[in-house]
Amino acid sequence: MTKFHRVAYIMSRFPGLSETFILREMCEMERLGWNLSLYPLIYQEGGVIHEEAKPWMSRAQRPSLSSILKENVKLIFSRPWLYFSTFLKIFLGNISSPKFLSRAVVVFPKAVWMARQMSEENIEHIHSHYATHSALAAWVVNRIAGIPYGITVHAHDIFVDRSMLNQKLKDAQYIVAISNYNRKFLTDHYGEWVAEKIRVIHCGIYPDQYKGTRSQIGQGGKFEIISIGSLRPYKGFTFLLDACSLLKKRSGKNFRCRIIGGGELKEPLTSKIRDLDVADVVELVGPKNQSEVAELLKTANCYVQPSIITPNGKMEGIPVSLMEAMAAGLPVIASSISGIPELVVHEETGLLVPPENPEALVSAILQMWNNSQDAFVLSERGRRLVLNEFDIINTVSLLSDSFEEVLSEDDLWK
């Protein structure tokens, strides 16, 4: 096997359920022979974690406060102009966003430490997931240590607050967009120069992890609806609850809706369930790991992704949970926003509905419920699409090729 370069991954949080797709990507990259180091900005203690994350926990870089302080003092005295000019660029680049600026000020000293640590590890390339603070850390390391970097852009990291995004994109060797929608979005905002840097590579899953015999639609018992995601506004679960209330009034209690995930909206959603009188048909299951999700998907008849665009522009990219449901052979309903139509093609691989529209959700659910054969055809087409375009073995192979390409170009100039 070819001797691969040493690559550092920077991600915002680890180990966390919300960044499963990055964990899968790293595992597959190592299977291909890449030598990876993991640099999370925040190491999350406690909570539900994936089994696959456990081997990485001891490998994740977790600097002490004293080591961070030491490296910053050393750089101030050895290269004061570089230190303060870099900080000034960060300050001016984020000054329009107090939230980003406060976080950037916290990320900067840690990135200074990363620059020294990556140099000592002989890291030759950095890959950052998300164009916000992870990419900022990669940009700082690049300025201090000269290590080139690339970025994968996902969703809110480009849709909401784009402070300093232009600078981070310009200095990146390449940009991976998880959808054609994202590529067009960045091109519309920054011009053709950014399009030339972008490679569209979907996030992926291991489809075989979700194979199994699912519940049969229309064969008696309750119609089982399932939805997965962090309990945050852009996931749109409040509208799914409204849809369940309407569905209960029209079709009785012969269905159940389970929402898997945890987050900031747990209490408001619990209150809304009580206010709508749907506690007998809706259940907040809580967060689950990958293997538990795979088992729960086998018990469902239909998957719903009720995503919305929040007032500040926050929205999904292409939800990995949708890929998992389709790989499990479930017919899916999703909102027609962002890159979702690249996965859920209306009336071909699933049903699309307008966001924030409980009536449309109810109609789509009833269509799946009352037309089991049509739903089966949609689910079969959906599974084939995931197998063809969202299998992580194929998507990571494309990313690996991109790494080899840019690192080979670097070697030519050394």
Image (cartoon, grey):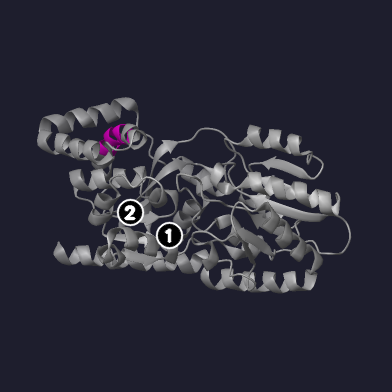
Mark 2 and mark 1: span between their CA atoms? 10 Å
Position above or below: 219 against 239: below
Q: Position of residue 79 (x, y in %)?
A: 11, 36
Which residue, given by chain and number where applicable, does mark 1 sit on?
29
Q: Are marks 2 and 1 in contact (CB under 8 Å)?
A: yes
Is residue 59 in view from this perspective? no
Q: Earlier in the sequence, mark 2 or mark 1?
A: 2
Q: Is residue 67 left or right of residue 313?
A: left
Quarter of the picture containing the C terminus is bottom left
**Residue type indicated by callout 2:** Val
In which quarter of the view is residue 13 placed? top left
Identify the element where label 1 is drawn: helix
Which disc, if any, is residue 390?
A: none
Considering depth in this image, is 3 or 22 the residue closer to the camera? 22
* Residue at horizontal 75 percent and vertical 57 percent from the top: 300
Position above or below: 221 against 385: above
Which residue, given by chain and number where applicable, does mark 2 sit on?
7
In which quarter of the view is residue 384 placed? bottom right
Considering depth in this image, is 313 or 110 the residue closer to the camera? 313
Considering depth in this image, is 383 or 340 the residue closer to the camera? 340
* Residue at horizontal 65 percent and vertical 32 percent from the top: 267
Identify the element where label 2 is drawn: strand
Considering depth in this image, is 175 or 80 the residue closer to the camera? 175
Quarter of the picture containing the N terminus is bottom left
Q: Which residues are magenta?
A: 104-112
**Residue type indicated by callout 1:** Met
Classed neighbour count for the residue bearing mark 2: other residues with Cα under 10 Å, few (<14), some (14–19), many (≥20): many
Is residue 216 in view from this perspective? yes
Q: Is residue 398 left or right of residue 247?
A: left
Q: Is residue 211 left or right of residue 385?
A: right
